[in-house]
């Protein structure tokens, strides 16, 4: 009887802990969700996710359960998650939202996940956020939905009504790109550039760089034909970086879908077409991506080491972590693993040991190199920063380490 009493005593504490995070309506229909937002005079946040989306899972397991995130979203929004892919395991509730998914896709063209659509209490779309983020950053992005002067769709109406002020056009082009509304982003960018008498200022060249997305973009010809003039303002190699991104996107990437695709041959053809553009760095990265896609680890291993020897000082912490994790999972050479351990350590140091994914990679590499106690301590450090499903996954890794079991597949 005593055990039952203790459990009953703990129940309110468990419920209170669950309520600290963001509350999502899990049983209401689409019409009921909209009606609740209107009745409570709250905005409606629609979390558009898929079952295969890693960032979606991270938001659900790590960001939304946080108390400060729940405090903000529960106060200002009625929240609902809507699954945008279809699986054999879908519940009847998920299936009931299939028509809603079709409608939202038709009206708003969801192309990336997670995407968050935000509606006013009246039911009118006012804002859009693409991608997740850490708690404070995500709250700041969502705060823009609460004010007409920062709501994307509200400002879009202003643009469509004919506001062509240069400052407004420039800010709207950036906002449209952030919202993955590339069609409007390009229109607004072109409209802004048409108001400028000098495109070679630092601000305008940076803007051109951001919106040079195809060989038809205004900035492409400028960057291709006058790289010295551009680099004199933006820094050495900036023009080549912008142009090479477009060239690879148009001339190489579409052909890589073929199993017979040879990146060296494709790069040679493109280099001949654009002899003045240095494609070496982008080409080396492309080869790594192809080897990874084809699971050609025998080629990937020396290629990634060579890439890091040439460009290691320029690699971002995220890329350091990705390289290190790929080596951990797939490469067996001790020297390569030792190199990956050093890359992983750099990513951990760059984030002051505050990024769980970086810590997890470092812990696994320590463990694979025989440093068991250090690995266990590092994995525990990662776990201490997590909540939900992701925490459970890391705990499984930690349990294997303590038992002396492999955390990788041979």
Image (cartoon, rainbow, N blue to C red):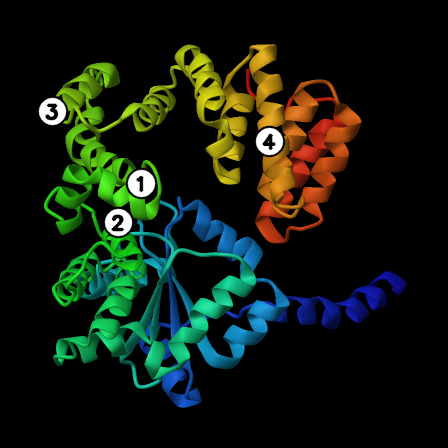
Report the disc number at residue 344: 4
Quarter location, residue 242: top left
Residues packed near mark 2 inside 10 Å, few (<14), some (14 to 19) or many (20 plus): many
Kindly report the distance in space between the C-alpha atoms of the residues bearing marks 1 and 3: 20 Å
Q: Mark 3 vs mark 2: which is more N-terminal? A: 2
Residues packed near mark 4 inside 10 Å, few (<14), some (14 to 19) or many (20 plus): many
Kindly report the distance in space between the C-alpha atoms of the residues bearing marks 4 and 1: 28 Å
Kindly report the distance in space between the C-alpha atoms of the residues bearing marks 4 and 3: 38 Å
Between marks 4 and 3 in the image, the one whose residue lies nearer the viewer: 3
| Residue drawn at 18 percent across, 60 percent down | 198
Q: Mark 4 vs mark 3: which is more N-terminal? A: 3
Q: Where residue 144 appears, x then y in whole percent?
A: 40, 74
**Residue holding disc 1:** 238
Under tag 1, what secondary structure? helix
Report the disc number at residue 267: none
Query: Contact (CB < 8 A) between labels 1 and 3?
Result: no
**Residue holding disc 3:** 273
In the rendered structure, the answer to whether residue 202 lies left or right of residue 398 reads left
Under tag 2, what secondary structure? helix
Between marks 4 and 1 in the image, the one whose residue lies nearer the viewer: 1
Kindly report the distance in space between the C-alpha atoms of the residues bearing marks 4 and 2: 31 Å
């Amino acid at each position: 009887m005593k055990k039952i009493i203790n459990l009953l005593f703990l129940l309110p504490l468990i419920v209170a802990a669950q309520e600290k995070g963001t509350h999502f309506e899990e049983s209401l229909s689409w019409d009921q969700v909209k009606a609740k937002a209107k009745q409570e005079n709250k905005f409606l946040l629609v979390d558009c996710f898929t079952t295969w989306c890693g960032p979606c899972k991270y938001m659900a397991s790590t960001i939304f359960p946080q108390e400060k995130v729940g405090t903000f979203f529960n106060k200002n929004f009625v929240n609902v998650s809507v699954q945008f892919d279809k699986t054999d395991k879908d519940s009847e509730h998920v299936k009931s939202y299939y028509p809603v998914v079709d409608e939202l896709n038709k009206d708003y063209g969801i192309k990336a996940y997670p995407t968050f659509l935000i509606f006013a209490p009246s039911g009118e779309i006012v804002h859009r956020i693409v991608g997740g983020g850490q708690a404070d950053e995500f709250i700041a992005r969502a705060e823009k939905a609460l004010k007409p002067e920062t709501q994307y769709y509200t400002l879009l109406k202003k643009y469509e009504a004919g506001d062509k002020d240069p400052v407004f056009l420039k800010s709207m082009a950036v906002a449209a790109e952030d919202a993955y509304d590339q069609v409007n982003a390009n229109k607004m960018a072109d409209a802004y550039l048409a108001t400028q008498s000098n495109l070679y200022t630092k601000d305008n060249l940076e803007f051109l760089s951001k919106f040079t997305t195809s060989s038809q973009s205004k900035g492409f010809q400028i960057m291709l034909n006058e790289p010295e003039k551009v680099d004199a303002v933006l820094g050495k190699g900036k023009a080549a970086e912008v142009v090479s991104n477009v060239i690879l996107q148009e001339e190489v990437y579409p052909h890589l879908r073929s199993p017979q695709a040879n990146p060296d041959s494709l790069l040679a053809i493109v280099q001949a077409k654009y002899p003045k553009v240095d494609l070496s760095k982008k080409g080396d990265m492309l080869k790594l991506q192809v080897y990874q896609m084809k699971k050609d680890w025998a080629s990937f291993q020396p290629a990634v080491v060579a890439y890091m020897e040439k460009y290691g000082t320029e690699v971002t912490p995220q890329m350091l972590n990705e390289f290190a994790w790929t080596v951990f999972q797939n490469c067996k050479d001790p020297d390569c693993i030792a190199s990956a351990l050093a890359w992983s350590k750099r990513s951990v140091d760059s984030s002051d040991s505050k990024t769980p994914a970086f810590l997890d990679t470092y812990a696994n590499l320590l463990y694979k190199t025989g440093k068991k106690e250090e690995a266990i301590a590092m994995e525990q450090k990662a776990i201490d920063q997590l909540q939900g499903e992701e925490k459970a996954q890391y705990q499984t890794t930690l349990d294997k380490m303590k038992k002396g079991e492999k955390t990788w597949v041979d």
